[in-house]
Image (cartoon, rainbow, N blue to C red):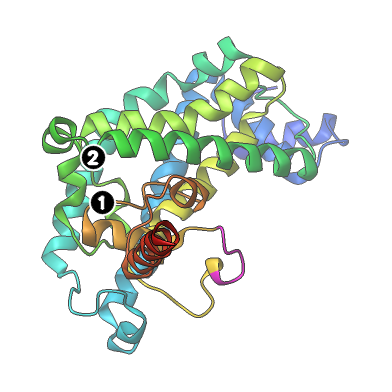
């Protein structure tokens, strides 16, 4: 059914697959037109990643240029310069093409090996929603522990220090890191769905794409450096966000988790003035109790 053009394939697909919705026809036409699943998945994955990463970072670049938003800047005296933004973008692009692109190209064979579905029809919204919720929890756990380990002396000095070049982060700096860190922390993003699929045998690559898009949004927004009255953690107290991660960059310690606050809360690794105050009050209460 492949045609000389993508839209020719789409028209042919539409004739014989009337049971599919529009998005499913677009998806099937892409794989039919490409006639090479590895190439089709590789191109789609890389283009999606670059479009989402830089597309989501662009609004924060614009926000940094508008003085009105300074009232919401967490570290108001540290506004990234155009030169810093440009240098950051170049290193991130270099990392994407040299570290992430080869991994993305191997993505389809890995999907086949672990049984991820790439066909149509798509899974239901309910199925994708609960699977993505599981991925957020799994990735957050992986991120907390690996990130915390990376703050150990030699690993911090030789690997993680690059990411802390900016004590006041900005959106583009979400993936500003050494190649080793990109691979280690990225394993939580990609490995969580793979692990889930290996155990359950039930996962569609579209669900994984939506998960990666949401994870990119989370990472970029957490590095934005802005705290708004409408920030998500005001409505979901266990959500981390920029207010949580910005302190980590400022203090260089604590607040290790990516999406949620519970690991830092339970293991007493919260950073910032409020957390320090709570620790002092806890110690004073313990000392008074001991004295009595």
Gap in angstroms between the C-alphas marked 1 and 2: 7 Å
Residue 151 lies left or right of residue 202; in this view the side is left
Q: Is residue 112 left or right of residue 72?
A: right
- Seen at 61% across and 70% down, the residue is 235
Residue 239 rendering spot, x and y as whole percentages: 53, 58
Image quadrant containing the N terminus? top right
Q: Residues within 10 Å of mark 1 (few under 14, many from 20)?
A: some
Numbered circle sitting on residue 151: 2
Of residues 144 and 195, which is closer to you in this image?
144
Report the span colored magenta: 234-238
Rendered view: 5 above or below 74: above
Circle number at residue 253: 1
- State the SS at label 2: loop
- Report if residue 127 is visible in the image: yes
Q: Is residue 236 magenta?
A: yes
- Residue drawn at (37%, 81%) of the image: 72
Whether tag 1 and tag 2 are in contact, CB under 8 A, the answer is: yes
Q: Where is residue 178 in the image (x, y as percent from the top left)?
A: 20, 36
């Amino acid at each position: 059914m492949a045609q000389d053009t993508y839209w020719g394939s789409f028209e042919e697909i539409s004739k014989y697959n009337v049971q599919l919705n529009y998005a499913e026809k677009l998806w099937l036409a892409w794989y039919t037109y490409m006639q090479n699943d590895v190439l089709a998945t590789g191109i789609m994955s890389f283009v999606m990643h670059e479009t989402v990463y830089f597309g989501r970072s662009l609004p924060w670049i614009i926000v940094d240029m508008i003085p009105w938003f300074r009232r919401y800047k967490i570290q108001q005296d540290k506004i990234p310069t155009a030169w810093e933004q440009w240098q950051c973008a170049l290193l991130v692009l270099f990392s994407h093409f040299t570290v992430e692109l080869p991994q993305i190209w191997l993505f389809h064979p890995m999907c086949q090996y672990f049984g991820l579905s790439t066909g149509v029809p798509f899974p239901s919204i309910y199925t994708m929603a609960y699977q993505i919720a599981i991925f957020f929890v799994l990735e957050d756990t992986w991120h907390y522990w690996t990130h915390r380990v990376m703050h150990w002396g030699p690993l911090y000095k030789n690997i993680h220090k690059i990411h802390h070049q900016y004590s006041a982060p900005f959106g583009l700096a979400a993936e500003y890191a050494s190649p080793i860190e990109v691979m280690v922390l990225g394993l939580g993003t990609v490995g969580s769905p793979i692990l889930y699929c290996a155990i359950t045998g039930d996962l569609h690559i579209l669900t994984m794409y939506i998960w990666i898009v949401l994870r990119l949004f989370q990472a970029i927004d957490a590095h934005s450096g802005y705290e708004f009255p409408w920030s998500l953690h005001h409505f979901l107290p266990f959500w981390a966000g920029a207010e949580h991660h910005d302190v980590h960059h400022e203090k260089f310690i604590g607040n290790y988790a990516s999406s949620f606050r519970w690991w830092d809360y339970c293991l007493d690794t919260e950073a910032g003035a409020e957390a320090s105050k709570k620790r002092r009050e806890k110690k004073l209460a313990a000392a008074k109790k001991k004295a009595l």
